[in-house]
Image (cartoon, rainbow, N blue to C red):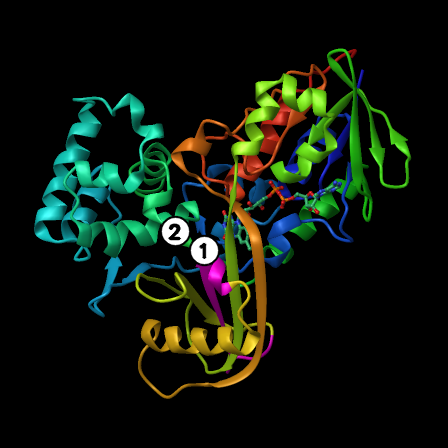
């Protein structure tokens, strides 16, 4: 017998849970406060897809959007160092760990001394002698890298840029455990894992729209412009969800796929104070994002990604503007955790972007600006500090019919697309088949 499942939030986590549940024959309803699904990703630049994001690739394949078949070129990871040197991390088509060992050995972004320290650490890690320290989750990545012999130049010339790109915050703000696990998955698990693909269009066309189409096919009801305002609990279960118009919705199972700061206000105070599971959510915080998108009258041939260390923006992606015409380029400039950029005017942000762009992509005259858009998100990505890492909840809440999904929950990944997808799939797997 199928269950009725009510999912709060139509971001990627909620939609992925809905897909798996409906495919398993459950009767699923999604409520979403915005007038569209997709959540935060609707405002995102083209996503950075690492081959190590296995759940993302599997979902794309299920939706008939296997990007592997499209012969898109892999994008090299390029660092612009403080000295002005431009260094590429070489992807070597060798089995692991040879690809990483040789890639590290040849990586000019680190000094010989830093490479030697890193290689000896990697060698010991593979041999598990000594095992990784138990307190890694409680330590700061910057301090831990220093303890394994990484110089200040390496930490601030390479590792900091990677921390911002992969974890959404600078090295002194991220957990050493999560940083190490993310690096290991992305760079140490096989020759393919290191490869980075940036599909030229946003996620709308190849993930959100096909997901929505598939949900419609499976009979999932999606209510847009519908805001949940309260969760009502009776004993150890959720009894109903109240909406802004006072309607009450009931189901056998409830899944919250909301950001953590949107879930807490829906809970009765006694629930928040009584259960550590919910209490600890108040210790989670988020980093800001400022994204500038420029359309430029300048042709380029292939997508490029440059990580910037000493500029106002932390990475830039530029790709041919296929939607408009071949002679144009779209440039995305992203700054993470730089709250002082949030109040700056559009004109100032565009000027800063053009100035950083001249460093990231030197040569030639400044192209004509066709159009510019700015996205300012004060709360964009879960901050992955050591203290917050242990507060990320697992899917099972203390209430028997209530599960929690979202990129910010504890999936083993930073709060990224892969994490959102995994969290939705895990919640769906916890709803049992059979009678409630
Ligand atoms: C700008 C940006 C760019 C990113 N780029 C990348 C990238 O390139 N690669 C990558 O891996 N990750 C990226 N991420 C991170 C990752 O994509 C997001 O963290 C992930 O999409 C979050 O999905 P989610 O479903 O957990 O949450 P959300 O997308 O936040 O979805 C939650 C949904 O709940 C809805 N909601 C909120 N309150 C209520 C309520 N009371 N009632 C009903 N609905 C409600 C919201 O409207 C929203 O649609 C990016 C994030 C941002 C913000």
Residue at horizontal 64 percent and vertical 55 percent from the top: 42
Where does label 2 land, which residue? 164
Residue that appears at 45% across and 58% down: 338
Q: Assign the C terminus to one quadrant of the image.
A: top right
Where is 336 relative to 431, above or below? below
Find out whether the residues at labels 1 and 2 contact each other: C-beta distance under 8 Å.
yes
Whether ligand 1 has any atom under 8 Å from the Cβ at mark 1 is answered as no
Image spot of residue 72 (x, y percent): 45, 59
- Say which label, 1 or 2, has the lower sequence index: 2
Label 2 element class: helix
Residue 281 visible to the viewer: yes
Q: How many marks?
A: 2
Give the answer, above or below, for where 318 lies relative to 253: below
Q: Which numbered circle lies on residue 403? A: none
Position of the N terminus, as image quadrant, is: top right
Does dot 1 land on a helix, a strand or a loop? strand
- What residue appears at the point 71 percent right and 40 percent down from the top-left corner? 9
Check disc 1 and report the residue beneath it.
Answer: 336
Magenta span contains residue 339: yes
Q: Between residues 55 and 261, which one lies in front from this camera angle?
A: 261
Q: Nearer the viewer, residue 385 or 25?
A: 385
Q: Is residue 300 left or right of residue 123?
A: right
- Where residue 254 sits, quadrant-wise, is top right
The residue nearer to you, when weighing 130 against 23, is 130
- Stretch of the chain drawn in magenta: 324-341
Say left or right for 378 vs 79. Answer: right
């Amino acid at each position: 017998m199928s269950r009725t499942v009510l999912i709060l939030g139509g971001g990627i986590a909620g939609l992925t849970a809905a897909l798996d549940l409906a495919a398993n024959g459950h009767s699923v309803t999604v409520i979403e406060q915005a007038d569209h699904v997709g959540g935060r990703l609707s405002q995102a630049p083209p996503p950075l897809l690492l081959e190590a994001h296995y759940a993302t690739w599997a979902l794309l394949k299920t939706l008939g959007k296997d990007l592997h078949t499209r012969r898109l070129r892999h994008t090299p990871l390029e660092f612009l160092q403080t000295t002005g040197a431009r260094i590429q991390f070489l992807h070597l088509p060798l089995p692991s760990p040879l690809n990483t060992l040789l890639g590290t050995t040849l990586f000019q972004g680190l000094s010989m001394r830093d490479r030697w320290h890193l290689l000896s650490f990697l060698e010991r890690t593979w041999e598990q002698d000594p095992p990784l320290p138990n307190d890694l989750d409680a330590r700061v990545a910057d301090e831990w890298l220093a303890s394994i012999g990484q110089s200040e130049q390496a930490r601030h010339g390479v590792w900091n840029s990677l921390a911002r790109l992969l974890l959404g915050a600078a090295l002194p703000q991220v957990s050493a455990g999560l940083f190490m696990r993310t690096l290991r998955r992305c760079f140490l698990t096989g020759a393919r894992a290191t490869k980075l693909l940036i599909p030229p269009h946003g996620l709308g066309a190849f993930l959100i729209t096909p997901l929505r189409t598939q949900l419609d096919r499976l009979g999932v009801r999606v209510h847009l412009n519908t805001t949940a305002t309260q969760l009502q609990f009776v004993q150890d279960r959720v009894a109903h969800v109240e909406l802004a118009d006072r309607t009450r919705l009931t189901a056998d199972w409830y899944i919250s796929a909301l950001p953590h700061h949107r879930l807490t206000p829906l809970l009765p105070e006694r629930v928040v104070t009584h259960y550590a599971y919910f209490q600890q959510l108040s210790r989670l915080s988020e980093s800001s994002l400022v994204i500038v998108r420029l359309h430029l009258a300048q042709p380029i041939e292939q997508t490029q990604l440059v990580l910037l260390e000493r500029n106002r923006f932390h990475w830039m992606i530029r790709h041919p503007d296929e939607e408009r015409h071949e002679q144009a380029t779209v440039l995305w400039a992203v700054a993470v955790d730089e709250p002082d950029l949030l109040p700056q005017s559009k004109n100032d942000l565009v000027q800063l972007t053009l100035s950083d762009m001249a460093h990231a992509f030197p040569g030639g005259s400044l192209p004509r600006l066709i159009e510019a858009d700015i996205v300012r998100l004060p709360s964009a990505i879960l901050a992955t500090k050591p203290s917050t890492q242990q507060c990320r909840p697992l899917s099972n809440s203390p209430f028997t019919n209530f599960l929690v999904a979202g990129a910010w929950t504890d999936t083993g990944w930073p709060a990224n697309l892969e994490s959102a997808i995994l969290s939705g799939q895990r919640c769906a797997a916890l709803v049992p088949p059979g009678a409630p």
